[in-house]
Image (cartoon, helix red, strand yellow):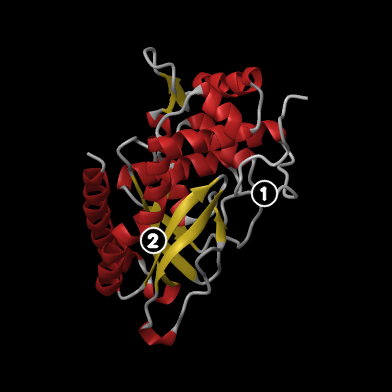
């Protein structure tokens, strides 16, 4: 038997066992390192209830994956900066809404239309913020947490336009492409041509492709890494979104995009 006892860390209920034992050991060791700053082999062995050879394999696995390193002088193990990087990414996802919301609110006031903010999740976009316009008492049916396909939405196409060809094809092939409205693009070559037009003008349009009677103008945000996992849009009934108004809204949304990118990338500089 490799384990000295089945209780694991003292604060856990012995009846609540991790179904994947190796994960319990790896994350248990990682928690010890992050809590203490560093720890020796015997300390980890005793606190996890593992014999020395098993604890050694667990720690070496963390070193191999880049989550820990061993001090050459003391022999103790400590967490690597990879943990800090992961924590920073998690917090940036949480904080991004608070950072961009003032800009989205100002955009809503300029446009007098509803503004949506989304994050990419696979072949879909998830609404993570919404600034509702009460103009004429008409409200969008969208809600925070709901999803929208990338292939037939303004926000989705705004992000896809700046992806490499392989990633675009993967999105298309893994989406359930079908006509949600008579205007939905369902031909791959037509989709690629649409992405080219988006790159030329700097913004995407949803011409009733996802929902009949609703038109959107959207842009994606370029992060300092070059990724584009966030996008935002202005949505309104087609009766208020003729081509002349689209051109005016394009000025507002492109200006807001520039301001937000300076803000979010400046925070990480």
Residue 104: quadrant of the picture: bottom left
Residue 222 position within the rendered picture, expressed as x and y whole percent measured from the top left: 33, 43
Front residue (pair 226, 53):
53
Where does label 2 land, which residue? Answer: 233
Where does label 1 land, which residue? Answer: 176
Front residue (pair 74, 191):
74
Report helix, strand or loop for mark 1.
loop
Residue 222 horizontal side relative to residue 79, left or right: left
Front residue (pair 179, 145):
145
Residue 268 position within the rendered picture, expressed as x and y whole percent measured from the top left: 26, 41
Q: Residue furthest right?
A: 1
Residue 160 position within the rendered picture, expressed as x and y whole percent measured from the top left: 46, 43
Q: Are marks 1 and 2 in contact (CB under 8 Å)?
A: no
Looking at the rendered structure, which numbered label has been put on residue 88? none
Front residue (pair 216, 130):
130
* Residue 52 shows in the view: yes
Taking 126 as reference, is 109 above or below it?
A: below
Taking 20 as reference, is 96 above or below it?
A: below
Report helix, strand or loop for mark 2.
strand
Taking 37 as reference, is 219 above or below it?
A: below
Residue 188 position within the rendered picture, expressed as x and y whole percent measured from the top left: 58, 40
Residue at 53% over, 63% down: 145
Residue at 58% over, 19% down: 56
Q: Earlier in the sequence, mark 1 or mark 2?
A: 1
Quadrant holding the C terminus: top left
Residue at 63% over, 60% down: 180
Residue 103: quadrant of the picture: bottom left
Residue 15 horizontal side relative to residue 56, left or right: right
CA distance separating discs 1 and 2? 23 Å
Residue 10: quadrant of the picture: top right
């Amino acid at each position: 038997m490799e384990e000295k006892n089945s209780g694991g860390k003292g604060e856990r209920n012995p009846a609540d066992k991790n179904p994947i034992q190796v994960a319990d050991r790896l994350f248990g060791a990682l928690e010890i390192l992050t809590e203490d700053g560093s720890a020796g082999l015997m300390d980890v062995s005793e606190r996890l209830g593992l014999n020395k050879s098993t604890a050694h394999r667990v720690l070496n696995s963390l070193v191999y994956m880049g989550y820990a390193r061993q001090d050459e002088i003391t022999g103790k193990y400590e967490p690597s900066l990879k943990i800090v990087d992961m924590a920073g990414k998690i917090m940036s996802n949480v904080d991004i809404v608070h950072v961009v919301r003032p800009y989205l609110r100002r955009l809503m006031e300029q446009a007098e239309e509803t503004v949506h903010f989304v994050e990419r999740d696979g072949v879909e976009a998830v609404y993570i913020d919404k600034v509702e316009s009460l103009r004429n008492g008409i409200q969008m049916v969208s809600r925070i947490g709901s999803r929208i396909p990338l292939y037939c939405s303004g926000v989705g196409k705004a992000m896809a336009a700046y992806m490499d060809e392989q990633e675009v094809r993967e999105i298309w092939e893994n989406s359930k492409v079908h006509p949600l409205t008579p205007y939905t693009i369902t031909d791959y070559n037509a989709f690629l041509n649409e992405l080219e037009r988006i790159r030329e003008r700097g913004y995407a349009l949803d011409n009733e492709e996802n929902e009949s009677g609703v038109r959107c103008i959207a842009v994606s945000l370029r992060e300092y890494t070059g990724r584009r996992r966030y996008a935002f849009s202005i949505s309104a009934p087609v009766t208020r979104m003729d081509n002349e108004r689209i051109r005016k809204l394009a000025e507002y949304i492109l200006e807001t995009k520039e301001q937000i990118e300076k803000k979010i990338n400046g925070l990480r500089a």
